[in-house]
């Protein structure tokens, strides 16, 4: 049974699949404790999303799965929670990923079961904001269009804002534009206003686009992607990336390079040692490839220990070199 305007939603959880990014699951809990788990295909191609018919419940059948205790960043297997709503808390619109914002993602209208419940959450936040409006205020300031559920700007929650654009032009300040790009075609001696990245450009950025720039700092990656730093961070969270993996990949690259040099030195001295070094190098290269495909993964414990050993050897070598050079300088 689908949700309807008379059905009271008490909880809503939305998960994305960390392996197959286009797969999404949602858990809806309605008044009376009725639980419904749905599965969707958020395809980047095409003009609509698809809800799978008769989706087999996976999450709600788990023994350790308690809907009321799940929050954002919760992960169970390959399913990562990107949005959590509980009716006993004030809706936190600031944490809603752009993927679930109707103004940023009009494809949501093609899956009404999820879209309608997001509308219901939005209405709860709207009503809560209306309570905070002073009684002497005009009704025009507190009421929106009842037909399209669009409130006035004074009570517009983040759910219906374009998070890459400021909601009101009169509130624009220089500090709020720090994450947007400058116009490259500005004339000498003339300062252009910083451009806002179009929403359709942001929506088209896929995980494969981010992977191309994992080997560089996030600030540099944002320039190549032509988006602001804040927008890129928000896009990363949308794909389950909580830390930009540049440092992890750079660390592995340094270790791989060191092993490559060591293998060359050992090749003429000890072939067995050279083969062992080459094998470890292959393992690190494989680990690097896995992190590039699944950037939420951490460096393996064994690799961290090896990295620490390398740091210690370097420190001892520097200390020994310093001690050997000190007497020579004294004489």
Image (cartoon, rainbow, N blue to C red):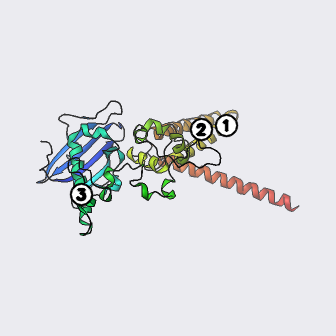
Q: Are marks 1 and 2 in contact (CB under 8 Å)?
A: yes
Q: Position of residue 221 (x, y in %)?
A: 53, 43
Which of the numbered marks, if any, corresponds to residue 143? 3
> Which residue is disc 2 drawn over?
277
> Where's the C terminus, which quadrant?
bottom right
- Name the residue at 35% across, 56% down: 94
- Name the residue at 39% across, 50% down: 163
Is there any visible trace of residue 22 in the rendered image? yes
Q: Is residue 237 left or right of residue 195?
A: left
| Residue situated in front as seen by the camera: 261 or 18 | 18
Q: What element does badge 2 sit on?
A: helix
User: Which image quadrant is residue 23 in?
Assistant: top left
Give the Cα separation between the discs numbered 1 and 2. Answer: 9 Å
| Residue situated in front as seen by the camera: 195 or 9 | 195
- Name the residue at 23% across, 38% down: 111
User: Which image quadrant is residue 325 in?
Assistant: bottom right
Is there any visible trace of residue 79 in the rendered image? no
Which class describes the residues within 10 Å of circle 1: few (<14), some (14-19), or many (20+)? some
> Which residue is disc 1 drawn over?
266
Which class describes the residues within 10 Å of circle 3: few (<14), some (14-19), or many (20+)? some
Give the Cα separation between the discs numbered 3 and 1. Answer: 76 Å
Tag in front: 3 or 1:
3
Which is more N-terminal, label 1 or label 3?
Answer: 3
> Where's the N terminus, which quadrant?
top left
Which is more N-terminal, label 2 or label 1?
Answer: 1
């Amino acid at each position: 049974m689908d949700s309807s305007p008379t059905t009271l939603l008490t909880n809503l959880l939305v998960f994305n699949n960390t392996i197959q990014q286009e797969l999404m699951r949602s858990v809806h809990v309605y008044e009376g404790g009725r639980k419904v788990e749905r599965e969707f295909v958020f395809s980047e191609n095409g003009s609509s999303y698809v809800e799978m018919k008769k989706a087999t419940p996976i999450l709600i059948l788990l023994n350790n799965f308690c809907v009321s205790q799940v929050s954002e960043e919760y992960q169970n297997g390959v399913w990562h929670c990107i949005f959590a709503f509980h009716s006993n808390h004030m809706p936190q619109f600031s944490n809603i990923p752009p993927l679930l914002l109707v103004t940023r993602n009009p494809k949501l209208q093609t899956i009404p079961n999820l879209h309608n419940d997001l509308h219901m959450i939005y209405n709860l936040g709207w009503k809560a904001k209306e309570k905070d409006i002073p009684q002497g205020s005009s009704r025009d300031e507190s009421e929106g269009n009842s037909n399209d559920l669009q409130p006035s700007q004074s009570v517009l929650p983040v759910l219906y804002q374009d998070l890459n654009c400021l909601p009101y032009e009169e509130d624009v300040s220089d500090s709020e534009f720090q994450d947007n790009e400058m116009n490259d075609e500005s004339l000498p001696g003339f300062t252009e206003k910083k451009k806002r990245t179009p929403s359709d450009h942001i929506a088209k950025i896929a995980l494969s686009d981010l992977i191309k720039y994992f080997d560089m700092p996030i600030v540099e990656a944002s320039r190549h992607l032509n988006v602001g730093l804040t927008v890129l961070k928000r896009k990363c969270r949308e794909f389950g990336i909580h830390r930009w993996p540049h440092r992890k990949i750079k660390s592995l690259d340094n270790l791989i390079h060191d092993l490559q040099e060591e293998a060359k030195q050992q090749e003429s001295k000890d072939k067995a040692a050279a083969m062992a070094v080459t094998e470890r190098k292959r393992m690190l290269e494989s680990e690097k490839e896995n992190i590039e495909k699944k950037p939420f993964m951490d460096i393996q414990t064994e690799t961290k220990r090896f990295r620490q050993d390398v740091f210690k050897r370097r420190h001892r070598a520097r200390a020994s070199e310093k001690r050997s050079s000190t007497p020579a300088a004294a004489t």
